[in-house]
Amino acid sequence: MPSRSLVAGVAVFTLFASMTTGGAAAAAHRTYYVSQSGADDRPGTAAQPFQHIQQCADVMAPGDTCVIASGTYRETVTPARSGTDRAPITFTAAPGATVTVDGTDVVSGWSQVTAADLAQLQAADARIAGSPFASGVSSGHVYQAPVALSADLPGNQVFVDGAMNVEAQWPYPGNNPIRPNWANAQSGTSTSLSDNALTQPAGWWVGTRLTARNWFVAESGTVTSSAVGSVTADSLTDCISLQPNQTTFYALSGALRLLGHGGSWFYDPAAKKLYLWTLDGDNPASHLVEAKQRNVGIDLSGRSFIAISGLGVRASTVQTSPTSTDNTIDRLAGRFISAYADLKRDPNMVTVPDHCAMLSAGETTSGILLNGTRNTLRNSTLDWSAGNGVMVAGSKNTVTGNTITHTDYLGSYAAGINVIGQEATITHNTVTATGRSSINIDNKVAGAFSRSHDIGYNDLSDYNNLVNDGGAIYVCCRNDIAGTSMHHNLMHDPAPLARFAPAPGIYMDLGASNGLIYNNVVWNNTTYGAVLFNTETSGTGTKVYNNTSGTDTNVVSLHGGPYTNMEFANNIGNVDTQPGITASNNIPFSTDPLFTSPAVNDYTLQANSPARNAGVVRPPATDGFRDKRPSAGAYQYGVPRWFGGASLDSTTVQAERYASSNGVARHAAGTGMVMGNFDGGDWAGYTAVDFGTGRDTFAASLGEDPAYAGRQFHIRLDSPTGPVIGTVTSISTGGFDTYETQYTPIVPTGGVHDVYLVALGSSPGVANLDYFSFTRTR
C-alpha cells in the first residue's frame, strides 16, 4: 500500500498535468444531456440523458456543457458551482429545441361549484349573495380545484392554455394590463374615492384591494369602509389625491365575490382552493391550467462564469446576486417574468421613505435581476412583467440587443430597464409598451449618485401607458449622474394618455444633474421635446448637444430653476433658456431643417438643409463631421445614418396578402388593407415565407376588441393541419382596428415554408391582422 505522501505527490502531479496540458484539460470537460424522457439516475449522456436540468447543475464542473432537449421544465435551476474565466459552465438548448424553465405547476382536480357550495360560502360571507360570483355559479360557469399556492410569492398568476388570466376584479379589466379597463372616480381625497357606479350597500367593499392611479402615482391599499358611492382605504397616503384637471382611475380586487367574468380567477389561501371561470365558461379540465409556484427559474446567485444560451423562462425570472460576476445570458426568451398585485415600498430603498415611497414598488425585486459585476443580458426577448423587464444593479453590467415589451403594468417606478448600479452599458435595446418609463434611474433605489452609464442606440416607444409625468428615459431626483451619456436614442410615440402631460424623450427631474445628452431623436407627441429639465432647487452641469425634435416644437424645455453651468448647442427645435445656461447654434422650430423624409421618420438632412455647417464642435456629439463645420441635429450630413434598437433578422408579411383562405376577408383600415373576419375555424395561408437560417419569434400587428380578447390562433407550417410552431393569444387593443404589436415565441424554424394562421375554437372575433413578422435577434 503506498504511503500517504506518495498518494499526495501523485495527486499534485496529476493536478499540475491537467493545468499545464491543454489537451488533457480539454478532454476532462464533459457534455451532459437533459431530456424529459430521461432519468436523473442515468449518466447524462446523449443516449441516457438526465430528466431535470438541475441534475446537470448539480454535477457540472468548470468547462462542462449541459445540452437540453425541447420541453417545459418545472423547476428552479441553481448551479452548484461556478465556472472559470477559461472554462465557463454552459447551459444551452439543443439545436432547434424550445426549452422553457417554468415557474408554474399544472392544476388538476376540477369540479363545478354547486348550489350547496355557494350556500356554504354565503353562510360565511353574506356579501356573496347576489354577487357576480353567485351569478356565475348559478349559470354553471365557475369551477374549483384544491391547490396550495406558495405563500412566498409576491403575487399569484394563473394561465389557461398558456394565456395569462386576470385576478377577479371590478370592473373586469380585460386581458391587456398595459391598457386596462378601469373605473373613473368623480371626486375624492387622498384616501377615498367617490363614484356613482359604486351602488353596493355600505360595507360591501370592505376588505377588498383598492388600486388607484392619478397623475404620476399608482398605489394600492385595503378598503376599510365603504358606502353607496364611495370607498375608503385608510392605508393610502397623501401622495395620491384628486386634483383639478386630473383623472383618478381605480379598480377593486381581492375578494371571491368579484369573480364574475370569463378569463378570471380567485385564490382562497385559507381554504387552499383556486376558483376559475374560463373564457368560455367550460370545465377547466378540458384545458391546461397552470398556477405560478416559483419566483426564480434560474438562480445564479453567488455564481460566476455561467453561460445561459437559448433557454426560456416563463412565470419566473433569472437572477444574479451582488457576488455574481461574468455571467452571460444570451438569447433568453422570457415571458411573464414577475407578478405582484400590491404596490408596496421596495425593501431596498436607500432614501428615507416618504409619503410616496410606494412608487418604488418592484424596483429592485422584479424583472431579470442583473446584479454583481460584468454580467451580461443580450439578444433576448422579454415580454410581460408587472414590474421591470430587467433590473441592473452592481457595476459594469451590460444589457444589449434585447427586445423588451409589456412591462411595469402596475405603473410604479419599475421600468423596461431599471438602472440602479454604476457603470452600466444599456445599448441597442428596443423597449416598448411600458406602464411608465422605458428606462428609469431614480434616487429612491439608486441613491444620490448613478454614474458613468452608457445609454445609447436604444429605440424607446409607447411609454407612460398607465401614469403621467414620465419619459422614455427618466432620471430623478437630486441624482448626480456624472459620467453618464445618453446618446443616439430614438424616442417616440408615447402612449395616448401621456400626450396630455410631460412625455419627453429624456426627463431630468427634480435636480438630476451632470449628464451628457447628445445625438438623440424624438418624434410624435413627445411633449416638451428631447429633454425636459424640472427642478425645485438647482440643476447643474448637464450638456445637451445635437438632438433633433422631428415633429414637436421644443427640443429642450425648462421648468423651475435656477440652473447653472449648463450648455445647449447644435439642437434642432426650440430651446428654452435661463440664466446659467449657454445656448448657441440651435435651429428653431420655425426654420425648416429640410429633413430627408420625415413621413417615414428619417430625420437626416438634405443637401440644402440650413442645419448643415450650422453647429460648433462639441465632442463626442460632432465626431466625424465631414463639412467645414458640424451640422446641427443628431445626424451629421454625409455620414451614414445610425439606427437604434435591437438588430433583427426579419421576414415581414402583409396579413391581407394571403394566397389561400377559409372564412377570412380583406378590408380597409386606418393602416391600409388588413385581414379580418378571422373567426374560430378560419384560416389564412401564405406561400414561400423565408425563415432564413432560423427565426424564433412571431410578431404581429394585431387589433382586438375588448369583448373578444383572449381568443387564440395557431401558427402552422406547410398546411392548415401541419406542425404547430406557436400559439398566439389575442390581447385587447381597444378595438379591431386599433393595432398593437404582440410577440410570441415560436419553435426555432429555418428555411422556406408555407405558413398558415389557423383560428382555434368556434367563437368569432379572434383578431384583425395588419402584418406579421418572423424574427430573430442577430
Image (tube, rainbow, N blue to C red):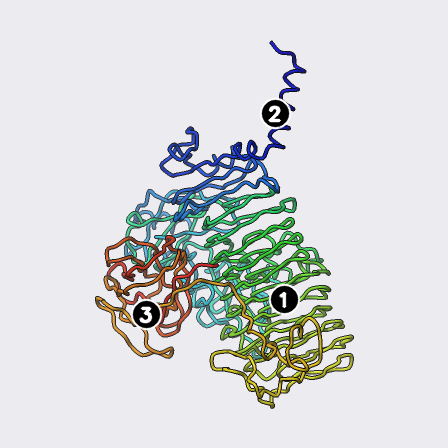
Q: CA distance from mark 3 to mark 2?
A: 64 Å
Residue at image mark 2: 14
Instruction: Out of 161 and 671, give the one closest to the viewer.
Output: 671
Badge 2 element? helix
In the image, residue 265 lies at what x, y percent? 39, 54
In the image, residue 699 lies at what x, y percent? 40, 63
In the image, residue 306 lies at what x, y percent? 56, 43
Of labels 1 and 3, earlier in sequence is 1
Of labels 1 and 2, earlier in sequence is 2
Q: Is residue 327 left or right of residue 764?
A: right
* Mark 1–mark 3 CB contact (< 8 Å): no
- What residue do we see at 61% from left, 62% from top? 359
Q: Nearer the viewer, mark 3 or mark 2?
A: 2
Residue at image mark 3: 655
Q: CA distance from mark 1 to mark 3?
A: 46 Å
* Mark 3–mark 2 CB contact (< 8 Å): no
**Which quarter of the figure is the N terminus placed in?**
top right
Residue at image mark 1: 239
Q: Amino acid at mark 2?
A: Thr
Q: Amino acid at mark 3?
A: Ala
The image quadrant that residue 346 belongs to is bottom right
